[in-house]
């Protein structure tokens, strides 16, 4: 069974993680404006991302008609690939001198220099089809075995294989041409890319589905392709489809399923990627932190805690519906949807009255660094939000082994999504609470024990009682999402839990689980330590000191917060001595107790460090007399 380590994002990151999930990506780990930023790469790799997504802007390569400068993208691609990232590269950005209304000049010219749209050995792109030339040159340059690979001596197979033809073509802010214009753009991209690299994968540009009932660009494009005599011989001019969703995690599954349904109507099967999903927060700079009591002011924004829950729920819904890969937007806040250079200090809305910049989009797993181009004035720069911890947990759980589509079930206020791992005969059940009060799920066991993973921080060993696991689930909080269904209180449920269980076929086929111990009853939303091992030594024979540790704390805590600790020993723990240090002052005893948690009340702006000692039943004290912080947090 999978064994998980403590989440490094719950406190200071101290060690590199080896987790890497091929079904998870992050947008803008790097970009043209942030090349060779080792710090950002390590942040993303530590979180477990395997994919990066960024735009290759045509207008920043072809600087004047027929004059190309690839040098900046050469560095970016080389850096990404050197760090082991796979790339979803968006071909985007028409140069102004190739404008033709909302479309591209020369787009309807033949794709190839022989005057045809038919690929063939030795054919080159038609120089009069400017888009075809750009796509062909980009793929030729960056594919495995391509120009840059040859120049730099890349290993076999290293290069870009996924090419996305534009971004959100169904939104006029990205594409103001017609559906027919986009269909031609996609066809040209497919033919040119496959001529340059037969193993290229060309993606239908990520769809926003802003008004899918009247404006389904995928359906309309396929209808046009159905009349094209070349469509059957050239894969309907697409290898895969991208789709986007924000704010409502359930919709991630709905848009993926809609794409698959449209494809099936045309007799097609194609991989679908949810290659943009996320939600901005309002309760942290640069978000509008003063809008806590104003639903209109925080519309389509959520709390940091809700953003963490969104990460798990959006990915689960998308994978359950059949998504191959899920990308979250984005690693840092960067500039959000605001103009480059936008910056202002934290404020309570007073800057808005003067008409200046006062709030921005806080999408990032990380807050911006001090030297960023936007939003540089957070009191805790370059620190993770809770959503970073949630992504890490997601990568740990779902990057461990292959899994199939999920089974979504809702009973009362509890949602469960069950994924199967056929190679290890395991089921992975992700579950959360949709109500505003604590609830408990009784889950029928299919094995004799399970690992329960908390997105808050810790893991728990569970054994069933009377053939069931009893699992506490934290409540949701209202998020004022404007498109809720009747009876719903929030688009985002409470922080999920994940159960991982190796299946015993005899139990699934009608047997009953035989409990081996009482279940661990969890307080909804709490972080508790893993159940300690049973003592192995009588106290009078125990000469080995115990070990004690404090569970890592969030980067930021409210004034009153809960501290958890635990210990291990051969004979058993008699009691703990918990120490606290305020800022950089002297360590002082806080509690001497046999409990494993306590409420601490601090002061805003102060940093608190905690350490634990333990005495075992044999009278031995733990050896860490030189106190070092085991958990730290800042009250804000």
Image (cartoon, rainbow, N blue to C red):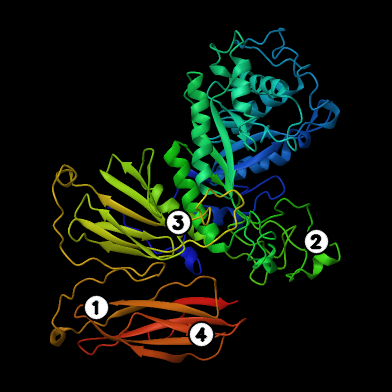
Disc 1 secondary structure class: loop
Q: Is residue 282 above or below residue 169?
A: below
97 vs 523, nearest the viewer: 523
Contact (Cβ within 8 Å) of mark 3 with mark 4: no
Which residue position is annotated with label 3?
Answer: 434
Which of the marked residues, 1 or 2, is nearer the chain's N terminus? 2
Q: Is residue 461 above or below residue 246?
A: below
- The CA distance from mark 2 to mark 3 is 36 Å
Which residue position is annotated with label 1?
Answer: 569
Disc 4 secondary structure class: strand
Q: Quadrant of the C terminus?
A: bottom right
- The CA distance from mark 1 to mark 3 is 40 Å
Q: Residue at x 25, y 43 (%)?
A: 425
Label 3 or label 4, whichever lies nearer to me, is: 3
Disc 2 secondary structure class: loop
Q: Residue at x 16, y 42 (%)?
A: 509
Which of the marked residues, 2 or 3, is nearer the chain's N terminus? 2
Label 1 or label 3, whichever lies nearer to me, is: 3
């Amino acid at each position: 069974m999978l064994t998980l380590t403590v989440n490094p994002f719950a406190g200071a990151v101290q060690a590199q993680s080896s987790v890497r999930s091929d079904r998870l990506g992050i947008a803008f780990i790097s970009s043209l404006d942030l090349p060779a930023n080792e710090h950002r790469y390590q942040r993303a790799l530590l979180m477990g991302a395997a994919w990066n997504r960024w735009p290759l802007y045509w207008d920043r390569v072809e600087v004047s008609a027929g004059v190309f400068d690839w040098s900046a993208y050469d560095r970016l691609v080389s850096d990404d690939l050197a760090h082991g990232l796979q790339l979803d590269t968006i071909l985007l950005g028409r140069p102004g001198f190739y404008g033709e209304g909302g479309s591209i000049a020369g787009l309807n010219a033949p794709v190839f220099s022989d005057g045809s749209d038919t690929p063939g050995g030795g054919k080159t792109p038609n120089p009069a089809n400017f888009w075809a030339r750009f796509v062909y040159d980009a793929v030729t340059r960056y594919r495995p075995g391509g120009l840059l690979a040859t120049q730099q001596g890349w290993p076999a197979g290293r290069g870009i294989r996924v090419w996305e033809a534009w971004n959100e073509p169904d939104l006029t802010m990205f594409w103001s041409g017609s559906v027919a214009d986009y269909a031609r753009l996609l066809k040209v991209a497919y033919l040119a890319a496959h001529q340059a690299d037969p193993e290229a994968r060309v993606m239908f540009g990520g769809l926003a589905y802003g008004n899918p009932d009247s404006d389904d660009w995928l359906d309309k494009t396929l209808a046009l392709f159905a009349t094209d005599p070349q469509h059957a011989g050239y894969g309907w001019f697409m290898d895969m489809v991208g789709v986007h969703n924000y704010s409502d995690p359930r919709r991630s599954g709905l848009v993926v399923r809609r794409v698959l349904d449209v494809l099936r109507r045309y007799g097609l099967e194609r991989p679908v990627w949810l290659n943009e999903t996320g939600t901005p927060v309002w309760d942290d700079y640069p978000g509008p932190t003063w809008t806590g009591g104003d639903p209109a002011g925080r519309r389509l924004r959520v709390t940091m805690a809700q953003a963490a829950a969104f990460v798990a729920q959006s990915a689960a819904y998308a994978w359950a519906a059949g998504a191959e890969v899920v990308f979250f937007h984005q690693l840092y806040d960067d500039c959000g949807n605001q103009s480059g250079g936008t910056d202002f200090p934290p404020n309570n809305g007073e800057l808005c009255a003067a008409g200046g910049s006062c709030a921005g989009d806080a999408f990032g797993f990380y807050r911006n660094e001090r030297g960023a181009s936007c939003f540089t004035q957070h009191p805790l720069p370059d620190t993770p939000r809770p959503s970073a911890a949630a992504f890490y947990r997601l990568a740990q759980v779902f990057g461990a082994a292959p899994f199939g589509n999920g089974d979504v079930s809702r009973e009362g206020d509890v949602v469960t999504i069950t994924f199967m791992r056929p190679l290890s005969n395991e089921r992975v059940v992700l579950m959360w609470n949709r109500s505003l009060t604590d609830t408990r799920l009784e889950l029928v066991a299919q094995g004799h024990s399970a690992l329960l993973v908390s997105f808050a921080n810790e893991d728990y060993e569970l054994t069933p009682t009377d053939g069931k696991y009893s699992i506490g689930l934290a409540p949701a909080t209202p998020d004022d999402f404007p498109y809720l269904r009747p009876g719903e209180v929030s688009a985002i449920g409470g922080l999920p839990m994940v159960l991982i269980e190796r299946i015993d076929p005899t139990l699934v086929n009608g047997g009953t689980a035989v409990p081996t111990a009482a279940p661990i009853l969890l307080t909804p939303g709490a972080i508790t330590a893993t159940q300690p091992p049973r003592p192995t030594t009588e106290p009078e024979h125990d000469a080995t000191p115990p070990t004690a540790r404090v569970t890592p704390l969030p980067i930021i805590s409210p004034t009153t917060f809960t501290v958890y600790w635990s210990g291990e020993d051969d004979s058993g723990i008699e009691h703990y001595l918990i120490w606290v240090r305020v800022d950089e002052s002297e360590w002082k005893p806080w509690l001497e107790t046999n409990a494993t948690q306590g409420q601490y009340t601090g002061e805003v702006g102060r940093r608190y460090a905690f350490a634990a000692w333990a005495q075992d039943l044999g009278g031995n004290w733990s050896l860490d007399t030189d106190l070092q912080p085991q958990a730290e947090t800042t009250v804000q």
